[in-house]
Amino acid sequence: MGLTPPVFIGAEEVEKHLHRASLLLPALEAALANFSAGAAGGVVQPVRTVVPVHRHGGFLGVMPAYSAADDALTTKLVTFYEHKKDSSVPSHQATVLLFDPRNGSLKAVLDGSVITAKRTAAVSAIATKLLMPAFAEVLCILGAGVQAYSHYDIFMELFTFKEVRIWNRTKEKAVKFANSVNGPVQVCSSAQEAVTGADVIITVTMATTPILFGDWVKPGAHINAVGASRPDWRELDDELMKNSILFVDSREAALTESGDVILSGAEIFAELGEVVKGTKPALPEKTTVFKSLGKNNPSCVQV
């Protein structure tokens, strides 16, 4: 008998299963805790390999992972490009491969763009649930791409904010965002205007130099830093990085991949999984930064 051909699961089918990103939270919390438990957690996930596409200014990332608890073996392939001209093409495109861990055969090929958008936003939501100040009222989003939409959707589902603000380098995209979502969003003319007084800030940009500065940020605010996934890219300045309590999804990845962490020299306080497990405190009364690097959690792509 030959091998069974792999199943292809497209974006629409993935969307049906993950129509609410909050459905991912229990699996992601368990995966984060298992990852931070080291060998005892049974998660093997090396730092991703990134291949530069010099001729076209892009990158290909390869992100393998195995979870013993879920007996899940996956690899995510993701490309990320800063499209200066053709804005119809997403900056990030992804495919997830799911293997049978018993024999290594390919079981499924999944469109990874929806998974990436919803998984990343769901992890930011977990961090925010644990780290944001009590009685948070103002949400600020810097960036207006795919991740801005996915973050907005789950944050509106899980939290209650009295005000939502957005800023984007191209104001037209921010206006389009505000007109597309279900709920009032204030479009701001500058990042500083959007950030001032905000309790929770989400940075989802393709910035390579800081767009968020410490002297703008309200003491006690929580920041989810999602962009700047290369060691020489930045979204946050040194003042903010050094004067905040820094949480990451992976210490190893942050010290290898994150320009915000590497170039600022900021000290990592804890992995998010350690907070989920209760082995490290959340410190929501402090100014906190969660640096997200999109670790690929295999338990979330079981078929």
Image: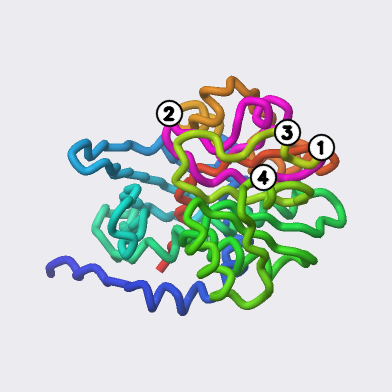
Compared to residue 59, the image places residue 246 above or below, namely: above
The kind of residue on which mark 1 rests is Lys
Determine which quarter of the picture holds residue 9.
bottom left
Of residues 181 and 101, which is closer to you in this image?
Answer: 181
Q: Indicate which disc, 2 or 4, sits on the residue closer to the N terminus.
A: 4
Q: Is residue 240 magenta?
A: yes
User: Secondary structure under badge 1?
Assistant: loop
Please state, as top left, top right, bottom left or bottom right, where the C terminus lies in the image: bottom left
Q: Indicate which disc, 1 or 2, sits on the residue closer to the N terminus.
A: 2
Colour basis: rainbow
Q: Nearer the viewer, mark 1 or mark 2?
A: 2
Q: Indicate which disc, 2 or 3, sits on the residue closer to the N terminus.
A: 3
Expressed as whole percent of the image width and height from the top left, the position of residue 140 reads 67, 55
As measured in the structure, the alpha-carbon distance from the residue carrying label 3 to the one carrying label 1 is 15 Å
**Label 1: which residue?**
286
**Label 3: which residue?**
215
**Label 2: which residue?**
232
Q: Is residue 98 at all visible to an observer of this figure? A: no
Q: Which residues are magenta?
A: 220-249
The kind of residue on which mark 4 rests is Gln
As measured in the structure, the alpha-carbon distance from the residue carrying label 1 to the one carrying label 2 is 27 Å
Q: Nearer the viewer, mark 3 or mark 1?
A: 3
Q: Indicate which disc, 3 or 4, sits on the residue closer to the N terminus.
A: 4
User: Secondary structure under badge 2?
Assistant: loop
**Label 4: which residue?**
192
Q: Indicate which disc, 3 or 1, sits on the residue closer to the N terminus.
A: 3
- CB atoms of marks 3 and 1 within 8 Å: no
